[in-house]
Image (cartoon, rainbow, N blue to C red):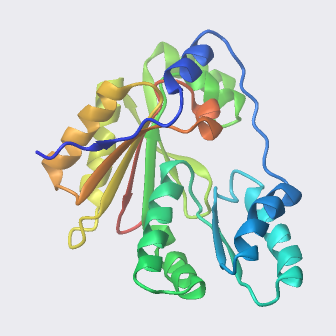
Amino acid sequence: MKSPKILEEFGYREFYDKIRHGARIKTSLLNSEELCSAFRPVLDVGEDIMYLTISSGISGTYHSATMAAEMLMNEYPERRIRCFDSLGAGLGVGIQALRAKKLSQEGLDVDEAYNILIKERLNVCEYFIVDDLSHLRRGGRVTALQAVFGTMLSVKPILFGSDRGTIETCCKVKGRANAINTLADKYREKRLSDTPGIVGISHGDCIQDANKLAELVEGIAKPREIIIVPHEPLTGSHVGPGMLALFFYGTSR
């Protein structure tokens, strides 16, 4: 079995350990001026831009990006800026970015690649579990009562990214081992059988569970590549340590 590609790009152990010990992490979106500052150097060298954002269903980043694009296209009328609402988060945005890169390498321009990504984005499946429901409670994803009883009874909601780009619950299972198996079952149920592409797995400092999930996925149908990454800090601050997520192209969300 070819080993999954494991990427470690930030001090995730320290980050998630601080949350375990009570740190409250706050996040804020980039405003349009900050995005303009990031886009201008690219436009200055004559390049077009496609900016992939976290879902508009959970963040205002897409709105900020469209405002920045409108301002800059007046300054650079010969350039094209496309803001793409991924309807996803974390590695769900990442595998679409990899898809965009591949389309660019194949010679497609920004509009052609954008149109393909729009057609495919509802095929990007995002399923995840969390270890502590209190983080979701603070974000309004579950009620305080659900968090208390869910933790007491070891009930694990299986969460997913909906067609609207919001986070929803598809089912609930008892215990973490069953929850990990259920993530793999979603891959079994929804994977594209004729195009075994990239599978992404992200984790909130639980690499052993991530490796276990990768083994289950490979046992169902070996993808072209499995990428395992620490879950990024932006949404990681809202799901907490022990979060485990699976991302893949499937028949539907």
Residue at the bottom extreme of this rendering: 78
Residue beneath the point at 34% across and 48% down: 227
Residue 193 in the image: above or below residue 22: below
Residue beneath the point at 27% across and 38% down: 213
Residue 113 rendering spot, x and y as whole percentages: 52, 81
Residue 176 rendering spot, x and y as whole percentages: 35, 25
Residue 161 rendering spot, x and y as whole percentages: 53, 53
Relative horizontal placement of residue 89, taking residue 217 as reference (left or right):
right
Residue beneath the point at 56% across and 56% down: 88
Residue beneath the point at 66% across and 79% down: 48
Count of marks placed on residues: 0
Q: Nearer the viewer, residue 16 or 246?
A: 16
Whether residue 239 is visible here, answered yes or no, is: yes
Q: Nearer the viewer, residue 28 or 172?
A: 28
Residue at the top extreme of this rendering: 21
Residue 245 in the image: above or below residue 189: above
Residue 38 rendering spot, x and y as whole percentages: 76, 60
Whether residue 64 is visible here, answered yes or no, is: no
- Residue 50: which quarter of the image? bottom right
Residue 69 in the image: above or below residue 167: below
Residue 29 in the image: above or below residue 130: below
